[in-house]
Amino acid sequence: MGINQITTEIGVSKMTLYKYLRHTNVEINAYQGPSPQLQNK
């Protein structure tokens, strides 16, 4: 479930959700994406 779906489900903006999470000391990490694969030459 993504952040957009969560905010739609609970009816708040992303800014409000992130402010609430920070206020309650929830650790927020940015999405890193898949790790790059090493290429063998």
Image (spheres, rainbow, N blue to C red):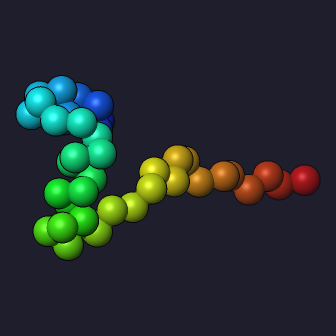
In this picture, residue 28 sits left or right of residue 13: right
Name the outermost residue toward the right: 41
Q: Is residue 14 above or below residue 27?
A: above
Question: Residue at left 51%, top 54%?
Answer: 32
User: Where's residue 13, x and y in %?
Assistant: 24, 36
Q: Is residue 4 above or below residue 18?
A: above
Question: Residue at left 45%, top 51%?
Answer: 31
Q: Can residue 1 be seen in this view?
A: no
Q: Which of 38 and 27 is in front in this view?
A: 27
User: Where's residue 33, x and y in %?
Assistant: 52, 47
State the quadrant of the N terminus.
Answer: top left
Question: Residue at left 24%, top 65%?
Answer: 22
User: Where's residue 30, x and y in %?
Assistant: 45, 56
In this picture, residue 40 sits left or right of residue 18: right
Q: Is residue 19 visible?
A: yes
User: Where's residue 39, x and y in %?
Assistant: 79, 52
Q: How many marks?
A: 0
Quadrant of res 25: bottom left
Name the outermost residue toward the left: 10
Q: Nearer the viewer, residue 28 or 38?
A: 28
Q: Nearer the viewer, residue 18 or 30?
A: 18
Q: Is residue 6 above or below residue 41?
A: above
Question: Residue at left 21%, top 48%?
Answer: 17
